[in-house]
């Protein structure tokens, strides 16, 4: 089966009260770890590539890796998605490169400019049978001492449900990334957070069936944080989104859950462990291999949480 878009996946996820995991890929081992989990659990798959991944690995290598994923997994629907494209030009390039889904993140611009840029991407992408994710609002936290957005500013950064409706209608985007209290990276919160589920709920009520996306959804697993800190790393204050919050959002209008930091931490933790326990080791297979295995186990755990285990067939 060729690469697919997200329409069918999101329709089934909405109906079934689950979400699809969207995992960032930067090299072969990360991709293999994710895909072996997906293949065992028979889950639908979104592999996403950032601008940084494109310049790190080069698009031709990443595309070749994903072509192998598709060829070797005919019973799994696979989306190749651009993560956080910030201009029309990069989105156009990705459509031309064969992506089946692109994200235009023009959320740093004014509401009107965001609509105009998104609309332009939608017109080009839809003409090439590619779906478009857009973003409204800016990621941050909703607790007093959250890093990124101050408490007074939170209301300005969370997605406004009324604006979301107007945005979707005017831009024509196929899915919308909303700011509901999550943020990117390993230092999302200082104390246990509460996500703004009301934002998800209100948009879900006003746009029934419309797929929403949750970025910044890594949970910063204790296992990997502890290994990193034990073996010479320094991430004592790392904190992610509680897993029960991710499971709850997945049952609501959130259809796509973005995970990158947890992949990075799994790989880093295992590499640090091998280096610390076997300082004479210099065969990359001996440290990248355990990292790849840790990614596989971690992704299997995420798929359970998102509720998408066994859902590949219905999303084809
Ligand atoms: O949302 C950001 C992703 O984690 C990608 O990060 O731009 O460093 O590849 P990156
Ligand atoms: P995390 O940093 O929480 O993994 O979020 C990744 C993401 O949102 C990619 O778009
Ligand atoms: Zn993101």
Image (cartoon, helix red, strand yellow):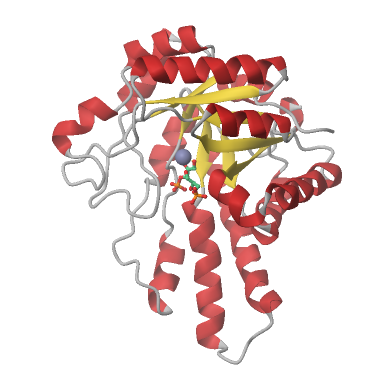
Say above or below: 278 vs 24: below
Image quarter of residue 138: top left
Quadrant location of the N terminus? top right
Residue farthest toward the bottom in the current orientation of the protein: 280
Q: Give the percent coordinates (x, y) of residue 225.
A: 41, 65
Residue 29 appears at what percent x and percent y? 68, 61
Q: Is residue 294 visible?
A: yes
Most foreground residue, 4 or 315 = 4
Q: Position of residue 243 (x, y in %)?
A: 42, 45
- Residue depicted at x 23% and y 26%: 156
Count of numbered circles on the image: 0
Q: Quadrant of the C terminus?
A: top right
Picture quadrant of residue 161: top left
- Asked whether residue 18 appears in the rendered view, the answer is no
Residue shown at 26%/44% (left/top)? 148
Residue 41 at x, y percent in the picture: 70, 45
Residue 184's quadrant in the figure?
Answer: top left
> Does 188 sit left or right of 301 as displayed?
left
Residue drawn at the location 38% of the way across and 38% of the way down:
245
Left or right of residue 137, residue 270 in this image: right
Q: Residue at x 40, y 18 (%)?
A: 113
Query: Which residue appears farthest toward the front when viewing the image?
Result: 89
In this view, the residue in front, 144 or 88, is 88
Look at the picture and state if 44 lies above or below 233.
above
């Amino acid at each position: 089966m060729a690469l697919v878009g997200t329409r069918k996946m999101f329709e089934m996820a909405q109906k079934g009260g689950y979400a699809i995991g969207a995992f960032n890929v930067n090299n072969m081992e990360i991709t293999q770890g994710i895909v072996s989990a997906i293949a065992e659990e028979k889950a639908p798959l979104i592999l996403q590539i950032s601008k940084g991944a494109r310049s790190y690995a080069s698009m031709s290598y990443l595309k070749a890796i994903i072509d192998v994923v598709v060829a070797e997994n005919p019973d799994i629907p696979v989306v190749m998605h651009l993560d956080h494209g910030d201009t029309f030009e990069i989105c156009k390039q990705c459509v031309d490169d064969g992506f089946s889904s692109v994200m235009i993140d023009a959320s740093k611009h004014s509401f009107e400019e965001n609509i105009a840029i998104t609309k332009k991407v939608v017109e080009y992408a839809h003409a090439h049978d590619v779906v478009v994710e857009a973003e409204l609002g800016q990621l941050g936290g909703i607790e007093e001492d959250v890093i990124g957005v101050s408490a007074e500013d939170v209301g300005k950064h969370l997605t406004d449900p009324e604006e979301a409706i107007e945005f979707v209608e005017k831009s024509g985007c196929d899915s919308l990334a909303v700011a509901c209290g999550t943020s990117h990276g390993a230092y999302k919160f200082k104390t246990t957070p509460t996500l703004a589920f009301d934002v998800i709920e209100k948009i879900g009520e006003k746009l029934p069936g419309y797929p929403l996306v949750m970025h910044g959804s890594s949970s910063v697993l204790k296992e990997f944080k502890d290994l990193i800190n034990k073996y010479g790393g320094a991430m004592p204050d790392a904190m992610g989104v509680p897993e029960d919050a991710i499971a709850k959002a997945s049952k609501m209008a959130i259809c796509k859950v973005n995970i990158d930091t947890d992949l990075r931490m799994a790989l880093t933790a295992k590499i640090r462990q091998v280096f610390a326990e076997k300082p004479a080791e210099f065969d990359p297979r001996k440290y990248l291999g355990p990292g790849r295995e840790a990614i596989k186990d971690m992704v299997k755990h995420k798929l359970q949480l998102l509720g998408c285990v066994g859902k590949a067939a219905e999303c084809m």
